[in-house]
Amino acid sequence: MSKVVLAYSGGLDTSIILKWLVEEKRMEVVAFIADIGQGEEVEEAAEKARKTGASSVYVEDLTEEFARDFVFPAVAANAVYEGTYLLGTALARPLIAKKQIEIARKEGAGFVSHGATGKGNDQVRFELTYQALAPEIGIVAPWREWDLKSRSDLVAYAKKHDIPIPVTPAKPYSSDRNLLHISFEGGILEDPWQEAPEDMYVLTTSPRSAPEEETSIEVDFEAGRPVAIDGERMTPAALLKELNRLGGANGIGRVDMVENRYVGMKCRGVYETPGGTILHVAHRAIESITLDREVAHFKDSLVTKFAELTYYGYWFSPEMELLRSMISDTQKDVTGTVRLKLYKGNCRVAARKSPRSLYAPAFATFEKEEVYRQGDATGFIRLNGLRLRIRALLRGRPEKGGGDGK
């Protein structure tokens, strides 16, 4: 029997895939469950994998690695896809695939498999990582092979084989959760005019029900990485978990968007990213006083590329290695503290300070000062406006020839 390592979550798709690999492909399945902060689902999923036919089950706690090596570099990059999505699922996939390859080599497995559909982004993210790290290992992509054509077919298959599944008529959407966020797609959300139901949300309180008083917090950064909340130093995973708690209690981090998938179609997704939203706002605030203007503007021009490469699945590509190295270099002086006010879905910057601050009150003040000669601005403006004056003068010049013949 061929041995395959399946990235297993215990959800609808991978539950069916595990049984399908055993029954239809006659493969020995090693189930790999990555604990990236999805909560109590992990142990339940492990037991379910064994009952469904896995020959062995690996469960690995990747929460610290996920926060340290994937989430925090994205925070340092200010990465946002299409101006809205903080890349919660996209950041997790390359880590899961990387560990899958490690297990495949340990087990001597010739194949790896995933539960991504042939329409989505995750198939690309998984398989580009497989190819970048282990091109010699084969890939089994059931959604592109089997004759099950819809989620309804999967539900019927599950009933036939007595496989418990998390999807119900009351909650027909699929979800993906990790330490950074939870996402919802499909079902009732496929109509972009249909408002997401309030009882769907997991990580965040409704802003209407959030506390009537602001929550004030301070986040400390060192070289672009968050290290403490209100002066208490924490590990990356613990810090992100605490910000999730604080942000969730104040209704922060809800996003409802229609995004452009890499394969070419539009898709509606609803996300909850409370801690990630706070970090994004805080990091931009500390950069505002520690980055040189041209460095900050050049770095902003890289945000779209960084987000696209992450979203598309090129985390382990040479161009991404170059981008991460460049962004890391910009973070050497991004050290300091940001004070934020959390209130009913809003995360507001209240103050920021840094021992590496480039903010100079003596130059910026509107009061009397002796360090800046305002008259110097005359030549500065005149030189920068030269091309505009030339353009206006030439456009206003009468054309030669023509006229009415008089």
Image: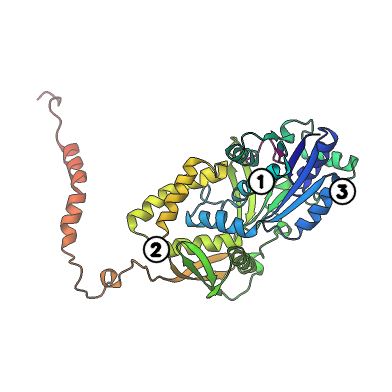
Q: Please report the residue visible at 50 percent of the width from the left and 52 percent of the height from the top.
A: 79
**On screen, 285 above or below 196?**
below
Q: Earlier in the sequence, mark 1 or mark 2?
A: 1
Instruction: Give the numbered dot on residue 333.
Output: 2
Query: Decide: marks 1, 3 in contact (CB < 8 A)?
Result: no
Badge 2 marks a residue whose secondary structure is loop
Quarter of the picture containing the N terminus is top right
Badge 1 marks a residue whose secondary structure is helix
Q: Count residues near mark 1 (Cα–Cα under 10 Å), then give few for <14, some for 14-19, many for 20+.
A: some
Nearest the viewer among 179 and 261 is 179
Q: Earlier in the sequence, mark 1 or mark 3?
A: 3
Q: Count residues near mark 2 (Cα–Cα under 10 Å), then give few for <14, some for 14-19, many for 20+.
A: many
297 left or right of 399 in image: right
Residue 365: image x %, image y %?
A: 28, 72
Residue 299: image x %, image y %?
A: 40, 51
Q: Amino acid at mark 2?
A: Asp
Q: Please report the residue visible at 55 percent of the width from the left and 60 percent of the height from the top.
A: 277
Q: Amino acid at mark 1?
A: Glu
Instruction: Give the numbered dot on residue 219.
Output: none
Judged by depth in the image, the label closer to the viewer, 1 or 3, is 1
Q: Count residues near mark 3 (Cα–Cα under 10 Å), then give few for <14, some for 14-19, many for 20+.
A: few
Q: Give the residue pinned by disc 1.
A: 102
Whether residue 108 is visible here, answered yes or no, is: yes
Q: Give the residue pinned by disc 3.
A: 51
**Magenta-colored span:** 112-121
Q: Please report the residue visible at 48 percent of the width from the left and 46 percent of the height from the top.
A: 321
Q: Earlier in the sequence, mark 2 or mark 3?
A: 3
Residue 119, magenta (yes or no): yes
329 left or right of 36 in image: left
**On screen, 124 above or below 364?**
above
Q: Amino acid at mark 3?
A: Lys
